[in-house]
Image (cartoon, rainbow, N blue to C red):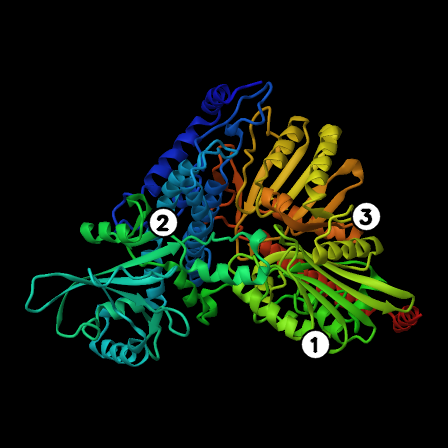
Amino acid sequence: MTTPRSVSSKLSVVESQQEPDTAATTAESADVMLTPQAPADDIVTPEESADIAAAAQAPTDEAVTPEPAGEFDLDSPELYLNRELTWLEFNRRVLFEGFDESNPLLERVKFVGIVSSNLDEFFMKRIGGLKQQVGAGILDYSVDGRLPSQQIEECYVKVRELEAEEAALIPRLIEDLAEQNIHITTYDALSEEHRQYLRNYYFDNIYPLLTPQGVDSAHPFPFISNLSLNLLVTLRHSDSEDELRARVKVPVGHGIPRFLQIPDSLIFVPLESVMANNLDMLFPKMEIVDCELFHVTRNANTARDEDEADDLLAVIESEVRHRRFAKIVRVVVQHDMDPTRRGMLAAELGLDEADVFENTGLMATRDLLSLCDLEIPALRYPAHYPIDHPRLAHMPNIFHAVRDQGSILLQHPYESFSTSVERLLREASRDPKVRAIKMTLYRTSGDTKVIDYLVDAAQNGKQVAVVVELKARFDEAANIRWSSRLEEAGIHVTYGVMDLKTHCKVIMVVRNDYNGLRRYVHIGTGNYHAGNARLYTDLGMLTCDQDIGRDITELFNYLTTGFTPKRNYRKILPAPKVLKRALLDKIKRESEHGKAGHIQIKSNALEDQDIVRALYEASIANVKIDLIVRDSCRLRPGIPGLSEHIRVFSVVGRFLEHSRIYYFANNGNPDYYIGSADSMKRNLEHRVEVLAPVELPELQAGLRNIIDTLLSSEYNVWQMNSDGSYTRLAGTNAEDNYSCQQALIADAQERMREAKRLKRRKPQAARRRNIHLRSE
């Protein structure tokens, strides 16, 4: 077998034989565009916009292209990309959408805000976890052969590159906004009239909330809350040369916007700029020496020992409170902050110099998302209105529709969440024939009716049981509130199985039909969250398939008791007991079919080493493999002799790709599955997940259309290279900028038009006959 060292040496030889000019050009572009030492005022010109795509192809790891033939050591670290680095590479693709001038201007601003928000969470979750490993002295290597400290170091390099790109983009966006009469400006750039307005507004509405905190021997350095924006003020008394310091928190949130708006205009001023220019209110008759901005991020990994807890709810409540006080993992400071104060700040926060990141412009740019709600249609994507599913639109009873017409495939946001999933719960809560409702709840939102309908059902005498996942990251507090409300309504609330997150998305309604009890089931790929259903692409299936109903009954019995006797699941593939082994078996089966084999997987991430290894083995057996992976992907495609039959794509567009589809050709008898699980170790081994088969030919055709549409489009589609970099299939100046998501919108609208056309043509007598048959 080939050792890791020999693999690496052979890879570089093959790479030098394959397209050396392209590789050189990509490396050169990356050096030019991504150097974090670029001057703060180095603005990318419009002519350079197309080069950003080349920059986005910068390798996520050292460039490696393995040997062309012979045996491979499938445990060799060189064959696996790093999870964290590939996730950062995904954010580079998202940021590219901000550079893409074919996107509406406010949407470009939105993508910048998304990247900033993602990076905050990356430090809270991933870097925080790696730092805990380093602190615990863990020296385990990752699948790709890196120690935790090495991963942090390499991630820091990528983050600085990414933030340098963002810093180059933001001034361009501000200029473009100004051309549309939307101005993001500083306080001192305003007219005297506007400055006076903001000073008065600030004094009346914000100043009373401020609490300046001195920093000296009598006043220890104050607590800095997570994701807070802060002013470090250096000042002195008018009759003294001694410098004093104070910290003032910028109180964004709870009704206070980050950007204050001048009335009757589209002029916005960052709150910190207003505060910095009116410090005389806080420190009267004192000389302001300097005012510097900083922003901190804290570790979100504060899990407590559940084995020692009697009440899981109390543990989670405590954890949420504790997270505010978790260790700080990074601080972002102004690039021109005084070196002495910068060192003092890092020391007070318990950080090394490597954990201090510089910012050359606007800080905490996640707050730009608030500006994207401006109602200026010309600067936003065309309005999208989900259609009602054609098979539900004209049916007065959703249960009759599923029972009489067969299983129904739902595609969000192309088809409405409210008139399908929420409708299922609404009708179930009121239908006198419904006896019970059981549901899993991972995330939901205040604007969804899910909780209301569950409460209504309980008040109407239905038996209602809800499995709430309290450990849904960053939604713990909200889920605690939902749990309390549900329990107050008399609903049976449980919190799943100890040590496993309940991540599956399942609803089961038990109804007393004309021929006895029947189970109606919804299995989805996304959360029961109305807001996400408008922004994420997800799938769901409504079915009354008898075997699936029995399986879901077994699943809920497991979730509500935690008991793990052997459960004979007929169709669904649940994790952690069944799913991973089933996927590996299906991949192996395709390997046995050789060139006739075909595997297609659409997921958010591909991280599990065993799944990647099995896919490598299938490719060696000449199986064709198409992977549509949104963000993290450990697998290296296109390696001669190993993964030359594998293609990896990533779609980044208007909607966040969130659906999961698993397809196996199975020698002409295809298997299609949808569900909640990504091919990640945590999903397959440490969560309760569900994949469900999609068996009706009509529904399989719908999934086939989704896969083919994503694979046939070029706009908004990126293809992974064997070194982990990505190539955008169509440039920003491509004549055909019709994305796959636009195509799926058009498909949904055409389905609705066709359904209406057939309904108009359907003879009245036939309609009466069908109604009669259903009533029988």
Circle 2/circle 1 CB separation < 8 Å: no
**Closer to the camera: disc 2 or disc 3?**
3
**Looking at the image, can residue 129 be seen?**
yes
Q: Element at badge 3?
A: loop
Q: Where is 425 relative to 622, above or below? A: below
Alpha-carbon span between mark 3 and mark 1: 33 Å
Instruction: Please give the residue where the numbered disc 1 appears in the rendered image.
Output: 456
Q: Where is 116 relative to 66, above or below? A: below
- Residue 621 in the image: state x and y as whole percent: 68, 26
- Residue 80 in the image: state x and y as whole percent: 53, 33
Q: Residues within 10 Å of mark 1 (few under 14, many from 20)?
A: some
- Residue 8 in the image: state x and y as whole percent: 48, 23
Alpha-carbon span between mark 2 and mark 3: 49 Å
Instruction: Please give the residue where the numbered disc 2 appears in the rendered image.
Output: 163
Q: Where is 137 relative to 639, above or below? A: below
Q: Is residue 626 left or right of residue 250?
A: right
Upstream in sequence: badge 2 or badge 3: 2
Residue 559 is drawn in which quadrant?
A: bottom right
